[in-house]
């Protein structure tokens, strides 16, 4: 890193802190940016800052949005009585891409992981239970099929059972440990259609 001036090194260092960016990619990105026209660099850094400043959790489903209530929760044509529980906004987007799910979502922002010290209170679970005090027909648990995802699904189903609300789990056509966002739409649809009651 000493081959470069302080400010270039700093830029490289910032990039290498990002997920999936190794030392080589960080250098490539830094030099790419230095070669970009100033106004383009400004547009990029403004987009980052604006998103960071304005994106917040939807008051209802906790997905990331720049409005108080996200467009999906606001949409009166969607079935507000069917709630699909996902781990993060990327998983929500994966299901939205199929265009076939007509219910709404609840984003947990994580999964229970005793190994990483993430407990039920560290994800948006209380918030889900509060939503279930309204009239809800079905909760579809679409957490990943990783150990954490399965642990979370079991925990949620036990929590909801006493309320009498129908709880289902997406079919395990989804590869084990697979992040939902990387799975193709056909597989996701099959997993949704083949869901079983817990
Ligand atoms: Zn929402």
Image (spheres, rainbow, N blue to C red):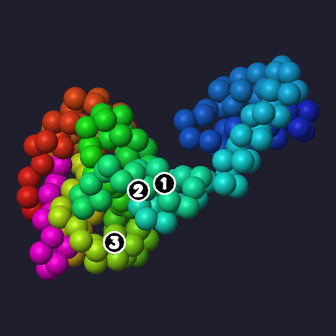
| Residue 114 image position (x, y, % from top left) | 34, 68
Left or right placement of residue 159 versus residue 116 in this view: left
Determine whether 128 is above or below 111 in the image. below
The dot on residue 70 is 1
Determine whether 19 is above or below 185 in the image. below
Q: What is the tally of numbered marks visible in this picture?
A: 3
The disc, 3 or 1, on the residue closer to the chain's N-terminal end is 1
The residue carrying pointer 3 sits among few (fewer than 14), some (14 to 19) or many (20 or more) residues within 10 Å by Cα, namely some
The dot on residue 73 is 2
| Residue 194 image position (x, y, % from top left) | 10, 43
Quadrant location, ligand no. 1: bottom left
Identify the image quadrant of residue 86.
bottom left
Question: Marks 2/1: CA distance?
Answer: 6 Å
The residue carrying pointer 1 sits among few (fewer than 14), some (14 to 19) or many (20 or more) residues within 10 Å by Cα, namely some
Mark 2 CB in 8 Å range of ligand 1? yes
Identify the image quadrant of residue 36.
top right
Mark 1 CB in 8 Å range of ligand 1? yes
């Amino acid at each position: 890193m000493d081959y470069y001036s302080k400010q270039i090194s700093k830029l490289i260092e910032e990039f290498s802190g990002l997920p999936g960016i190794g030392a080589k990619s960080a250098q490539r990105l830094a030099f790419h940016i230095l070669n970009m026209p100033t106004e383009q660099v400004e547009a990029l850094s403004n987009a980052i800052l604006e998103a960071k400043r304005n994106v917040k959790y939807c008051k209802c489903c906790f997905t990331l949005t720049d409005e108080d209530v996200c467009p999906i929760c606001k949409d009166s044509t969607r079935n507000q009585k069917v709630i699909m529980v996902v781990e993060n906004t990327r998983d929500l987007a994966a299901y939205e891409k199929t265009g076939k799910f007509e219910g709404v979502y609840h984003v947990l922002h994580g999964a229970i992981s005793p190994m990483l010290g993430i407990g039920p209170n560290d994800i948006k679970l209380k918030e889900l239970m509060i939503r279930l005090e309204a009239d809800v027909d079905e909760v579809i648990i679409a957490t990943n099929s990783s150990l954490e995802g399965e642990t979370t699904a079991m925990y949620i189903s036990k929590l909801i059972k006493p309320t009498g609300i129908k709880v289902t789990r997406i079919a395990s056509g989804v590869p084990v440990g697979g992040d939902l966002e990387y799975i193709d739409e056909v597989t996701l649809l099959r997993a949704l259609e083949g869901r079983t009651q817990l």
